[in-house]
Amino acid sequence: MPAASTRLRLLAALVIASLTVTGCQTLDDAGRAIGHSDLVNDLANRLDQALTLTYSADYQLAAGQTASIAQAQEPARSAYTWPGGRLTVTEEATTRCGTSGGRTVCTLEPPPATTAKPSVAMFAEAKRQGLVTPPVVVGLLTAAALDPDALITSSDTTLAGRHASCVEVRGSANDFSACVTTEGALGSFTGQVDGAPVDLALTRYRETVDSTAFDLPPGAGVVDRRPAGS
């Protein structure tokens, strides 16, 4: 695998995707039962493919709030924005920004290692704000596929003008529904992550990224915790 692709997969594996506010609105109301392994493989392949794409996506959260994801290559970088916060992952730094009392402060930390799977512990705040990552959804699907009591059904829908395949999991330890677009973007998710309800839906998808998507917010205070010389 080319080095750039490997770096992008590691960066993208750190975080965001989305949940639907009302659940998947299916074109086939009854849905259909599908094989667990086929389902997991299909969605995992789509999500994996998306890690090598350049795109930006906007999402609607619960209570009318919004979030966004921007991902680009050459160099590999990703940005995740939610109400009052932002996470940016590049080859130079992992940057977390938060706004409180009208003031934005960004903390720069070392970028994720390229030789091991990055930890996602630092993204707890993003999850608390309703953001979930493709790897999290893949993990939930895999757990459901291994659960003999889980009932998984599939259907199709359209999200932000993009065709998407949806799955609904019931009777497992984590009941949820999720949709993945043809391109491989996580289009929607409704369920619980770490005990917190998540409800997001894709509202806009573009195959381009704004040139300022990975910049620090204007006027933000900066705390650089990277080792000297990095």
Image (spheres, grey):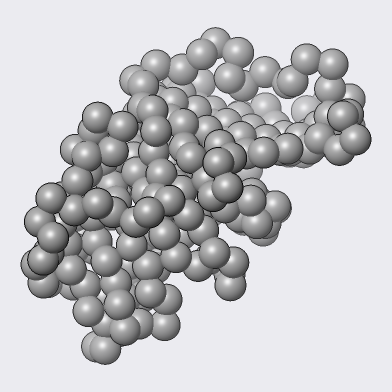
Q: Which quarter of the rendering shows the C terminus?
A: top right
Farthest bottom residue in view: 149
Instruction: Tell me residue 195's x, y (percent).
Output: 58, 72
The answer to whether any part of residue 59 appears in the image is yes
Q: Is residue 187 above or below residue 149?
A: above
Image quarter for residue 154? Answer: bottom left
Report whether 215 appears left or right of 165. right
- Residue drawn at (73%, 21%) of the image: 216
Q: Is residue 159 above or below residue 174?
A: above
- Residue drawn at (27%, 66%) of the image: 168
Report whether 101 appears left or right of 111. right
Instruction: Tell me residue 102's x, y (percent).
Output: 87, 29
Q: How many numbered callouts?
A: 0
Q: Is residue 210 above or below residue 37?
A: above
Report whether 74 appears left or right of 160. right
Image quarter for residue 50? Answer: top left
Image quarter for residue 127? Answer: bottom right
- Residue drawn at (10%, 56%) of the image: 28
Q: Which quarter of the rendering shows the N terminus?
A: top left
The answer to whether any part of residue 38 appears in the image is no
Instruction: Tell me residue 142's x, y (percent).
Output: 32, 70
Report whether 34 appears left or right of 225. left
Instruction: Tell me residue 138's x, y (percent).
Output: 36, 60
- Residue drawn at (90%, 35%) of the image: 101
